[in-house]
Amino acid sequence: MSNERWLNRSRQAVWHPCTQMKVHETLPIVPIARGEGAWLYDFDGRRYLDAISSWWVNLFGHANPRINAALRDQMERLEHVILAGFTHRPVVELSERLARLAPGRLGHAFYASDGASAVEIALKMSFHYWANRGRPEKTGFVSLENGYHGETLGALSVTDVPLFKTTYAPLLRPTHQAPSPDPRRAPPGVPPLQHAMEAARALEVWLSENHATTAALILEPLVQCAGGMAMYDAEYLRQARRLCDRYQVHLIADEIAVGFGRTGTLFACEQAGIAPDFLCLSKGITGGYLPLSAVLTTDEVYAAFYDEALSRGFLHSHSYTGNPLACRAALAVLDIFEEGQVLEANRRLARALTEAAEPIARHGRVRQFRHLGMIWAFEVADPPADFARRFFALALEQGLLLRPLGTTVYFMPPYVIGEPEIDHLVRGTRAVLDRL
Ligand SMILES: Cc1ncc(COP(=O)(O)O)c(C=O)c1O
């Protein structure tokens, strides 16, 4: 069956995410028949380079033979079992390995399926920790301006992207947003580090007045991704850790987008030399195969729930919590990291891509070209009306999956791209910029 048939059937029956469905009267949906490595193939034989790792989840390519084999093996053994009162090998091994790899001492892993569910868990756990410790007045949360933590009501309450939040405002809990260390927001002439320090001072002022009723600070370490790939100075994280310690407020690190090597280290917090009280993980955790998220936390938090009283326990669950197939995919991902020396290989890959992207950085329409680890981003000057959709459509014509955030264009490719893919990405992006 051709593209045409699938896209029409999809338009009738599927309500696509994060989409005003009417746009598909003019913008075709792209039906994908199969994936291989960094490429996606449609039903008419065209291929697209997945330069955004399918919403930042794919690490080692589509149809990765290693992950496929692990899943086939797991499928023959155990596809799923309730995790309340039961356990299984993949979830035990994954929890042990994540605890060893994560910064600090985060030895207890709680599981869910999507990123937003992990954020809900971290928020609820933080609040409940303080209640169990005799501080029930600590019910508030502080997050950063321009931050993004997901679309469920709790996660959206700590998100600060008006496009997603404003409509649902009457349903949300009031939370405070502290100034973002995003250097794009710095007044002219103020360098990124100074801007980050000023943002930290504003956080300090707010915490000094509100810490008694605040449970946690939640932030995206190093890069505010959905907020336009805002890459900020690691010093802000050190200051945030110091302030959370000083004012007895939990630090929740949302590494859902930046974890698993995206910023150049396995976890972004490592670059600031800090450990959070809660670490939220998802997306790349299964290499883009299956929905899985995890919240890692400390012995101290775990101990506050360990009690005779049922109600002092964390009575939160999702049916697929700790799904064995998803955990097995995650174990295969960790094997690839360990055996393939992925972080080192990515450093070489990043140097090659940055060098190849030089003509983009120098393009007349491009501003603030920036890069961290396996993320590249730039702003486009004088964007036409409807920029993001237009760029997306033009990129598809070039065989590229790129999905700008506002006027920010970014690359977040799978870690398996090689020279031909880099060349395709750079050439296609230049062609789009020339035609805007
Ligand atoms: C930092 C961050 N937190 C949370 C989420 C929500 O994850 P999910 O879309 O899996 O619910 C995202 C998704 O993009 C994210 O980037």
Image: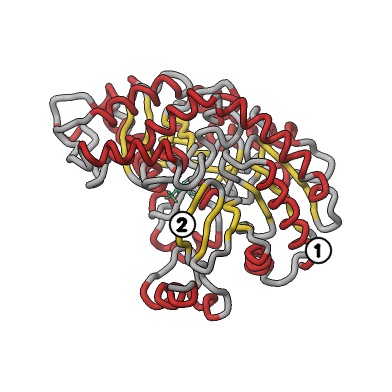
**Residue with the mark numbered 2:** 34
Residue 413 location, quadrant: top right
**Residue with the mark numbered 1:** 434
Between tags 2 and 1, which lies in front? Answer: 2
Q: Nearer the viewer, residue 65 or 100?
A: 65
Mark 1 crowdedness (10 Å alpha carbons): few <14, some 14-19, many ≥20? few
Residue 135 place in picture, x, y as percent:
33, 31
Tell whether 334 sits left or right of 385.
Answer: left
Q: Nearer the viewer, residue 177 or 362?
A: 362
Tell whether 75 sits left or right of 61.
Answer: left
Residue in view at x 45 percent, y 26 percent: 248
Identify the secondary structure beneath mark 2: strand
Question: Which quadrant holds the N terminus?
Answer: bottom left
Residue in view at x 38 percent, y 35 percent: 330
Dot 2 amino acid type? Arg
Q: Outermost residue, bottom direction?
A: 25
Residue 94 location, quadrant: top left
Q: In the rendered view, tell whether residue 116 sits above or below residue 390.
A: above
Disc 2 vs disc 1: Cβ atoms closer than 8 Å? Answer: no
Mark 2 crowdedness (10 Å alpha carbons): few <14, some 14-19, many ≥20? some
Identify the secondary structure beneath mark 1: helix
Tell whether 47 sits left or right of 193.
Answer: left
Residue 344 place in picture, x, y as percent:
61, 25
For the residues labelled 2 and 1, the Cα–Cα distance comes to 30 Å
Residue 268 place in picture, x, y as percent:
56, 31
Residue in view at x 51 percent, y 78 percent: 22
Dot 1 amino acid type? Asp
Residue 276 place in picture, x, y as percent:
47, 27
